[in-house]
Image: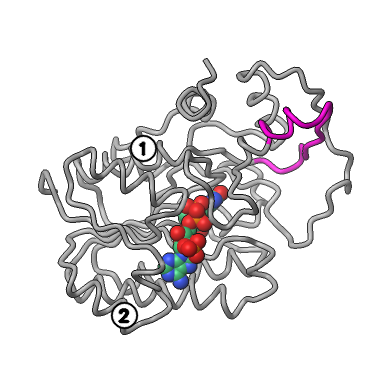
Amino acid sequence: MAAAVKIAVIGADGQLGSDIVAACRADGHEVVPLTIAQLDITDEAQVRQAVAAGGAGVIVNTAAMHQVEKCEANPARAFAVNALGVRHVALAAAAAGALLVHVSTDYVFDGAKAAPYLESDCPLPLNAYGNSKLAGELFVRSLAAKHWVLRVSGLFGCNPCLEKAGGLNFVDLMLKLSRERREVRVVDDEILTPTSTREVSRQLLHLLRRGAEDGLYHVTAEGECSWYEFAREIFRLSGSAIELNKAAPGEFPMKVPRPKYSVLENACLKRQGLNVMRPWQEALAEYLREKHGIH
Ligand SMILES: NC(=O)c1ccc[n+]([C@@H]2O[C@H](COP(=O)([O-])OP(=O)(O)OC[C@H]3O[C@@H](n4cnc5c(N)ncnc54)[C@H](OP(=O)(O)O)[C@@H]3O)[C@@H](O)[C@H]2O)c1
């Protein structure tokens, strides 16, 4: 791929989108950040017009409705954004001859495998969010001639997660609770790979520099942990004295089913010698240093 390229980023003020904008700019690319105020992907005509007029060689779509409970309560809206909206972007990217980089999720799996999922594993979402994201993936893979679908998981980044209450990601929520409470209880029966948005952005830059086959990629940090183990590492690195305990079974009942195990293996990146994702603990330590000055 050319050294510098024009890159449009959809969802540019989101947790991941804002880091991708910054990383691409720092790498010398011309970046067109698009927030929902400038481009609402549910508006097909607007998407077609913006993509055709923008002239970007690469379109990165981070936009999504991803609050699981909201998606379950309003599946029509979830599909309008995460599936049909993505279809609009895929068609426009194909018409413009642009590479579409589309961000998807570990929640396309049901968790029954209980071992790291490969890109070749069959998805079976448990909820409306996962189903709508899977439909979006399929539109990209069938309509966008040039595409990378990047499945990420458990994101934390320096900028607020716009869909979460107060914008707090899990790390910042734990730090807040450690200042406010003497004890915190966290579930130990959901296994994932926490992944820093900074790392995903670096991985994307690596793909842009080196080029990669069209297709589906798992892009998560190395390793896995439960939410309890994630919290334990946050408190260890931040020197917090808060008492951390495992939540009792059923203490935090899930309103919407979620995979109990959603660890992804970056098999396609590794096969092409392209994986630059580090262990989640290293990325967490970097995040705590850079955002919170914790050394
Ligand atoms: N957060 C996670 O833990 C996680 C885990 C796995 C996968 N993912 C995926 O990673 C991606 C980025 O997530 P994130 O954490 O960065 O989310 P985020 O902070 O909520 O950002 C999402 C962005 O999408 C925008 N958006 C929503 N609907 C839109 C529409 N119709 N048209 C245009 N833009 C729209 C939002 O704008 P407004 O806020 O102004 O509506 C926001 O800027 C998503 O595709 C998500 O499915 C996230």
Residue placed under numbered mark 2 in the picture: 46
Check disc 2 and report its element: helix, strand or loop: helix
Residue 172 shows up from this direction: yes
- Whether residue 55 is in magenta: the answer is no
Q: Residue furthest left?
A: 2
Residue drawn at x 50%, y 21% is 293
Question: Where does the image place residue 20, in percent across and percent down from the top left?
Answer: 34, 47
Residue drawn at x 42%, y 42% is 267
Question: Where does the image place residue 184, in percent across and percent down from the top left?
Answer: 80, 32
Magenta residues, start to end: 174-191
Residue placed under numbered mark 1 in the picture: 270
Check disc 1 and report its element: helix, strand or loop: helix
Question: Where does the image place residue 28, in percent across and percent down from the top left?
Answer: 16, 41
Residue drawn at x 66%, y 67% is 70
Residue drawn at x 45%, y 26% is 290
241 w.r.t. 287: above or below: above
Rounded to the nearest whole Å, what is the CA distance between mark 1 and mark 2? 37 Å
- Whether residue 178 is in magenta: the answer is yes
Identity of the amino acid at label 1?
Answer: Lys
Q: Is the Cβ of the residue at disc 1 closer than 8 Å to that at disc 2?
A: no
Judged left or right of residue 101, residue 231 is: right
Select label 1 or label 2 by which is in front. 2
Identity of the amino acid at label 2?
Answer: Gln
Of residues 244 and 242, the one drawn nearer to the viewer in this rendering: 242
